[in-house]
Amino acid sequence: MRTLLWSPNVDVSYFAAGIVAHLVCAGHDSWDESGISKEDLLEELGKVVTSWEQPKDEMVAYRSFQPFIPLLTALNMHQVQLWAVWALHHVTTKNSKRYCHMLVREGVDDVLRKLVALPGSNASVRELAGKVVDVLHENGFTKET
């Protein structure tokens, strides 16, 4: 998994990072047997996500963003949040007509707004979540605060 995490192909790295994000967020205590600590894996996750450039084309399709909510609200694991907001930013900038509506319908936009407003959240997470909120605004999905 760690080899795939650092793949030069962003799509391979992206999917590996998504698996890692979900596994570390799930809270299973099987890390002692894996040969890598949860903290080290989180550190790698954060580094790899920040190394990605935005692909020119859409590389993934989602039917629901509900699985993202636990990742976005994992306040003690900003690397997991970073993967989730990167993914949301990617899909909303590549196919805003499809995904902005889905974010709002599923309430994920409210989670993103809370992340942006949360003073203790990681600066990179807050910034990228803000960019997703900006995409929502640009596409007519505004809310009064």
Image (spheres, rainbow, N blue to C red):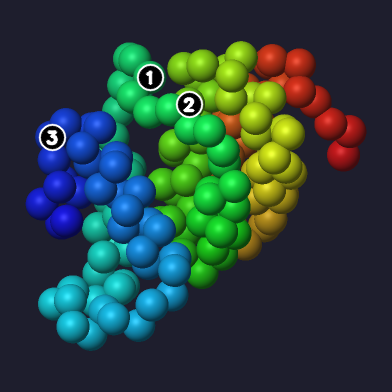
Mark 1 or 3: the one toward you: 1
Circle 1 SS class? loop
Quarter in which the N terminus is drawn: bottom left
Give the residue type at disc 1: Glu
Circle 3 SS class? loop
For marks 1 and 3 on the same chain, the one whose residue lies earlier in the sequence = 3
Q: Quadrant of residue 44?
A: bottom left
Q: Image point 29% across, 40% down: which residue?
A: 14
- Marks 2 and 1 close (CB-CB < 8 Å): yes
**Separation of disc 1 and disc 3 at Cα?**
17 Å
Q: Is residue 129 visible?
A: yes
Q: Quadrant of residue 32?
A: bottom left
Q: Image point 13% across, 77% down: which residue?
A: 35
Give the residue type at disc 2: Val
Q: Please say if 122 is above or below 6.
A: below
- Marks 1 and 3 close (CB-CB < 8 Å): no
In the displayed structure image, the side of residue 93 where residue 141 appears, left or right? right
In the displayed structure image, the side of residue 87 where residue 140 appears, left or right? right
User: Which residue lies under the disc numbered 1?
Assistant: 58
Residue 118, given in percent of the width and then of the height, sits at 69, 55
Crowding near pointer 1: few (<14 within 10 Å), some, many (20+)? some
User: Which residue lies under the disc numbered 2?
Assistant: 91
Give the residue type at disc 3: Pro
User: Which residue lies under the disc numbered 3?
Assistant: 8
